[in-house]
Image (cartoon, rainbow, N blue to C red):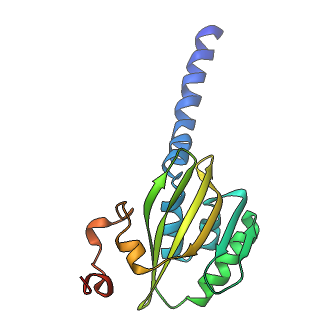
Amino acid sequence: MVRVFGPVLAVLLSLLTAPAAFAQTVHSDPFAVLRQAYASKDAKLAASAYTADGLAIYANDGVPEARVQGRAALERSFKGFFAQVADQNLDLNFRVVASTADAIRGVYRLRFGDQVSYGGFEVVLADGLFASDRSTSATASDFEFAAGPVMFAADAEPLDRSVYGQL
């Protein structure tokens, strides 16, 4: 009797814990998490896209390089940014230009209100999260003519008239 109960209990436990394991797998795309966090202005969610000691490096033209390390510091940084744009809708999207198993390089576009900001990114992944994220300056042309497809909602993407109007 005990021999039957042990395997039955093991099967029941595996069935009960399976949804939790599945949820972790589904939630493991840090780009999707970051996009959702920007849309909802959720600093804690944004920071959750990074490893516990994750590093964000902001190396944009014309300003000194800034570094933010650790999930708590990243959350504070995102909270400060989201407070600056509290009254605006945010739409973050990405185009991947090159990738390996643990590193991805590309271009992002952030729409907020009637403004658009572009940047390059180089991320290193660890356990499905950003271990490091280096952001650099980029242009609308860099984003629009990047080799890879738009990562999210590609069917809803309007053409950027400032780029395509020049062709």
- Residue 54 vertical position relative to residue 11 in the rendered view, above or below: below
Front-most of 112 and 42?
A: 112
Looking at the figure, which quarter contains the N terminus?
top right
Residue 142: where, in percent of width, then height? 42, 73
Q: Residue furthest front?
A: 167
Residue at image point 58% right, 73% down? 136
Say which quarter of the image contains residue 97: bottom left
Residue 6: where, in percent of width, then height? 63, 16
Residue at image point 34% right, 61% down? 149
Question: Can you see residue 90?
Answer: no
Residue at image point 59% right, 30% down? 13
Residue at image point 73% right, 71% down? 68
Residue 95: where, in percent of width, then height? 42, 64
Question: Can you see residue 155?
Answer: yes
Front-most of 95 and 84?
A: 95
Looking at the figure, which quarter contains the C terminus?
bottom left
